[in-house]
């Protein structure tokens, strides 16, 4: 691993941090827009398991996760040279797109079965991203652990909802 710089706080660093966190929150916002109508209509009619969290918990949890994801990506961008960071950040971007794809599949298309396929792919991509980030910056990898835990829970929830309906 080749470090790009040791000091923090340059204008470029701060701009990159804002852009990466903003990108993650923007994807979350798009997912929220896809989700909004279905939560109060279609989703409310589904059979859900007893361990299904209340709807109000999802917004704060996802907001925190998107911020952690953006910081993790920023740490990798900052810690590694362009060639070293390119692959891990490309996988990060792919998992972010698949994350949005899950919202489209589950809430937009109202298709829990398709969403199971998408979330299983997301699980693999987030695990791969975490392992790739770990080679560059251990803290960046640790910042993704809550995300990995949450989507693992979401996978169980998605599969259970699919089976119940």
Image: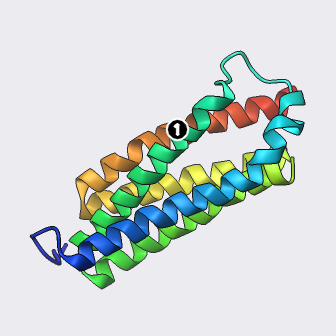
User: Mark 1 falls on what kind of element?
Assistant: helix
Write down the quadrant of residue 81 in the picture.
Answer: bottom left
- Residue name at image x 66 percent, y 60 percent: 30
Coloration of the structure image: rainbow
Residue 116 x, y percent position in the rendering: 74, 45
Write down the quadrant of residue 154 in the picture.
Answer: top right
Q: In this view, does 100 lie to the left or right of 80?
A: right
- Residue name at image x 33 percent, y 75 percent: 85
Vertical placement of residue 15 versus 52, above or below: below
Residue 48 x, y percent position in the rendering: 79, 24
Q: How crowded is mark 1: few (under 14 residues within 10 Å), some or many (20 or more)?
A: few
Q: Is residue 19 left or right of residue 77?
A: right
Residue 8 x, y percent position in the rendering: 15, 67
Asked if residue 152 shows in the view, the reply is yes
Asked if residue 118 shows in the view, the reply is no
Where does the N terminus fall, quadrant-wise?
bottom left
Residue under label 1: 60
- Residue name at image x 72 percent, y 37 percent: 158
Write down the quadrant of residue 83 in the picture.
Answer: bottom left
- Residue name at image x 9 percent, y 70 percent: 6
Vertical placement of residue 105 versus 43, above or below: below
């Amino acid at each position: 691993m080749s470090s790009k710089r040791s000091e923090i706080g340059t204008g470029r660093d701060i701009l990159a941090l804002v852009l990466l966190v903003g990108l993650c929150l923007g994807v979350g916002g798009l997912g929220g827009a896809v989700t909004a109508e279905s939560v109060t209509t279609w989703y409310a009619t589904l059979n859900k398991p007893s361990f299904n969290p209340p709807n109000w918990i999802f917004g704060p949890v996802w907001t925190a996760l998107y911020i952690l994801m953006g910081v993790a990506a920023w740490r990798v961008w900052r810690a590694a040279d362009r060639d070293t960071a390119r692959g891990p950040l490309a996988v990060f971007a792919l998992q972010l797109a698949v994350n949005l794809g899950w919202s489209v599949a589950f809430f937009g298309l109202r298709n829990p079965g398709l969403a199971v396929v998408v979330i299983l792919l997301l699980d693999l991509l987030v695990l791969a991203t975490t392992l790739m980030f770990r080679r560059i910056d251990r803290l960046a990898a640790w910042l993704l652990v809550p995300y990995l835990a949450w989507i693992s829970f979401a996978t169980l929830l998605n599969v259970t909802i699919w089976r119940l309906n």
